[in-house]
Amino acid sequence: MRKILIFLYLDIEWGIIEAEYRKKIMDDSIDDSKNIDYKRCNKYGFATFEAVNGKIMHFFDICKITDELLSVARDDELMQEICDFEVLANGYKFTGSFIDALEYIKANFEG
């Protein structure tokens, strides 16, 4: 199962990124700008949305998660993938979907 990291940064921004993808970005072994899914960026209004081979790699934003956004996410098959999530700020871990991760962010990000 894929490991996905959740970050909440000082109520300024939040994000979700696959752990291995993050390592590749950090060591400059990939150009993540080539993986931007502009259709989903527009669909969700996120600052970015990156996917590779039909799998979510990274997305983030500065806005609060709304019920409307969660409703849109529930209809997106990519958002339904089950992964192991870890919140970097507090070490909290759970297994769930990206929808579950967005619900966690909604409950814990002040914005």
Image (spheres, helix red, strand yellow):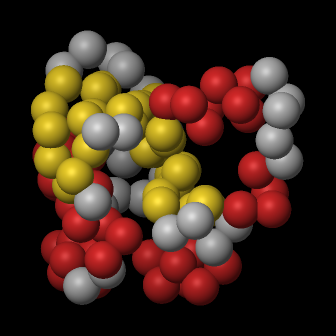
Q: Is 99 rendered above or below residue 9? A: below
Q: Is 75 rendered above or below residue 55? A: below
Tell me if I can see residue 8 in this picture. no
Image location (x, y in percent) of residue 20 = 56, 31
Image location (x, y in percent) of residue 39 = 59, 85
Residue at (15, 38) in percent of width and height: 95
Residue at (71, 31) in percent of width and height: 24
Q: Is 106 rendered above or below residue 25? A: below
Tell me the quarter of the picture where residue 89 sits: top left
Tell me the quarter of the picture where residue 29 sits: top right
User: Would you say 18 lies left or right of 80 here?
Assistant: right
Residue at (80, 57) in percent of width and height: 33
User: Would you say 66 lies left or right of 32 here?
Assistant: left
Image location (x, y in percent) of residue 88 = 37, 20
User: Would you say 93 lies left or right of 59 here?
Assistant: left
Q: Is 91 rendered above or below residue 36? A: above
